[in-house]
Amino acid sequence: MSSNAEFWQSPPSATLDRLSATPDGLSAHEAMARLARDGPNRLAIAPPRRLLSDLLRRLANPLVAILLVAATIAGMTGDLASFTIIVLVVILSTTLDLVQEHRAEATAEALKRSIALHANVLRDGAAVELPVSDLVAGDIVMLSAGDLIPADGIAIAVNGAQVNESLLTGEAYPVQKHVEPAATATIPAEARNALFHGTSLIGGTATMLVVETGARTRFGAIAASLARTQPPTAFERGIHKLGILIARLTVFLVLFVLLAHLALGRPPLQSFLFAMALAVGLTPELLPMIMTVSLARGAQRMASARVVVKRLSAIHDLGQMDILCTDKTGTLTEARITLVGHPGIDGEDDERVAELAAVNARFETGLKSPLDEALIVHATAERIAGWSKIDERPFDFERRRVSVLAERDGERIEIVKGAPEMLLALCTRAQDRSGALVPLDDGLRARLAALRDERAAQGLRLLGVAWKPAPGISRIGADGDEALIFAGYCVFVDPPKESAARAVARLEASGIRIKVISGDAAVVVEHLVAALALPVRGVLTGEQIETLSEPALAARVETVDLFARVTPDQKTRIVRALRARGHTVGFMGDGINDAPAIRAADVGLSVDGATDVAREAADMILLAPDLNVIADGVAEGRRTYANIMKYIRMGTSSNFGNMLTMALASLVLPFLPLTAVQVLLNNLIYDMSQIGIPFDTADPAEIARPLKWDMRELLRFTAIMGPLSSVFDLATFGLLLFLFHADVATFRAGWFIESMATQILVVFVIRTLRPAWSSRAHAALVTTASCGLAAALVLPFLPWAGLLGFAAPGAAIAGAILVLVLAYLASAELFKRVALPHASAS
Ligand SMILES: Nc1ncnc2c1ncn2[C@@H]1O[C@H](COP(=O)(O)OP(=O)(O)OP(=O)(O)O)[C@@H](O)[C@H]1O
Ligand SMILES: [Mg+2]
């Protein structure tokens, strides 16, 4: 692209020549060559992560840095055993982390690719569906309403193409596109023949010649500077806060231990290493890995429940979601709409009503709604024979109507169809069966309203049809739709979805309130929810919402579950109001009109067949338009949440308690309770034993309610379970010292075993709210925990255990430790009933 001329300034033929392209598209061979030359059509915001840079990033982590310093000191003082162990710890935990995370991310990426946007492209002269990332300059792309524009280019053919360019220009009003070159336009907003990546076609169709791809597009240029970073979820914020708390505590404890040891005249080097080891032991260093792996596992399981996760952290939000807003068509209904009647003003079917509606639907180039499709299916060729189109004003969700200027046998009229009440308000006359015009007096208005309400109350959907003569007019004016002549109604059935009632019941039973937000009339929506026996209350219409301030709306949304005749903007307002009330809100929708609300929700949900804009805005895509799929997904989301909580609870209770006792014991004892190396070893084995957590199952009771991060609850848990673990550590301490008069190496072996066994085994107590023995843990967790335990038990008995500073304890000590561990587990089981939320209730 030369810098002095913008691509939209030259005529299409010149641009085609410059790109060596034709209106019939590129050959697949040529396209491949261009793809290799220009790279994929992707915004390179996040460069693909490299193993090496990942490794370096991990080595720069303060924890690893501490370990490396410790290793260096140990090496320099000739403490070869410590040096080897520390280096081994670093290598093992870093690799473990790295491998697990990379595998997890690869899985998540693969899932995301399966729902990547596709474009309809001409290649080798035929239309093919290709991933948007395969597009190259010179490609010819066919776009229709609801599509995202996949690259920068020019329109070479249009049909009522309307584009929303707000992303680029901030202007929300749709822009009409044409093919004439914008020779004098210097900024994108003026280039009416240009189509820009990231904007969306909201009406009509367009054929596009791709000129620029990837980061070279306009959007690519700004996207790099405002890389869309998602704000952290409530769960992530909670974990971050916890992290800071732990870090503070660690620093305090470590400084305290170090200073106390120095004050007591202990050897400085040993004290330093011990304090460092404590710091490492206290840090939940596996947490990031556990989180990523849990989320990726969650995403994988949700994929088998037919939910594809686009933003991994949305799984937290799904686990926490307590309100689900949904649109009506396709989610609660079958979306198999058929025309069942076309009554005139006397209530009997009138051919002319069907004809007018069919002409309107046929000539409309905007986004075809299922209503239009039903009309077109119904419209036979002879019904619309002889009609030709002059102009149109496409559908938008504010006006809720479509106007078409059409002509037959020299008679030119404007035909309008749309939401009945709105249309009726625009009419001043009506036409009867004979075609004669009658005044639309109050009596007739009342009869027409009654006819409408009667059908709507049967759950039928209605559109009004009206027209007016338009002799000599060739464009529909902005204020054209007044003084219309009312013709009649088109009546449609959209049968309720049988599975919806069960799904809603499941969601309600799991603590999620359903709210239906529809652009359709209140009567229709109410009939539908009654037919499905949905437990919803109250109705609020768009008209009423219009008059409410934000605080007033926030007060109302709590108690109202049905919203009718709402505009896209009001859908967003409702979502915001609910969020302002502290709810975690999901929004499920499929249309252009749903996209802003999908984006505004905590969890944006859409379906695979939805318009691109809705899919793009969503965090998760359902592969089937069925609320049951969401219900399955919610269970998976909560399970993921629950598993991460398990690791956190483990870390804040037993592990924490152990390190705390160790620190205190080190002050009282004339020797270190465990050497620095032993503490690190303890920590490494403990970490290994927890790797199975992301695979674990969750009890139905635990995932029966939305899970919310609750710091107070966690602190309470820690305050109860931490000291409990310390009590048993101290008991071990006393036993070894005063009963068995153990020497240093035996003491350390004994304490090592006790501390490992309690830390590792308590997961089976903490992982469930039910009695530990009545809930089966996943095999993966059983395996990693048993391996960890076995390693810890065997270590002190190995021939070279002396190198690690252990001496094998005798049978008496081993027996005593066994009793202590069992007693600890039993009391943990007892105390968890008060420490865990709702544990006593289930
Ligand atoms: N093609 C059309 N021509 C005329 N009027 C239309 C057309 N499509 C929709 N309308 C009117 O606009 C209203 C709102 O549109 P629509 O029902 O698609 O909104 P929605 O919020 O997506 O509803 P739902 O909850 O059913 O998905 C319809 O009830 C109808 O009155
Ligand atoms: Mg809809």
Image: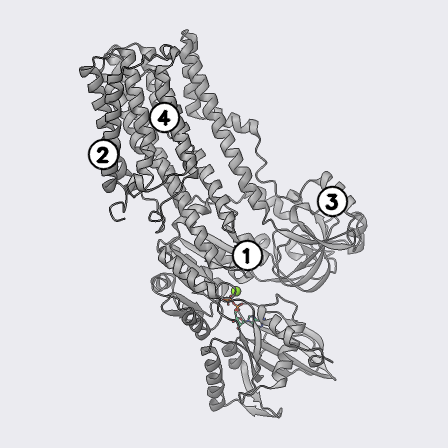
Taking the image as shown, residue 661 lies to the left or right of residue 401, namely left
Which of disc 3 and disc 4 is earlier in sequence? 3
Q: Calculate the distance from the C-alpha at mark 4 to the C-alpha at mark 3.
A: 65 Å
Relative to 507, is 476 above or below? below
Relative to 598, is 788 above or below? above
Q: Which amino acid does label 1 sit on?
A: Ala
Q: Residue 614 carries which label?
A: 1
- Residue that mark 2 sits on: 827
Taking the image as shown, residue 605 lies to the left or right of residue 798, namely right
The 10 Å Cα crowd at callout 3, few under 14, some 14 to 19, many 20 or more, is few
- Residue that mark 3 sits on: 1
- Residue that mark 4 sits on: 789
Which of disc 1 and disc 2 is earlier in sequence? 1
Which one is in front in this view, the residue at disc 4 or the one at disc 3? 4
Q: Calculate the distance from the C-alpha at mark 1 to the C-alpha at mark 4.
A: 50 Å
Which of disc 2 and disc 4 is earlier in sequence? 4
Which one is in front in this view, the residue at disc 2 or the one at disc 1? 2
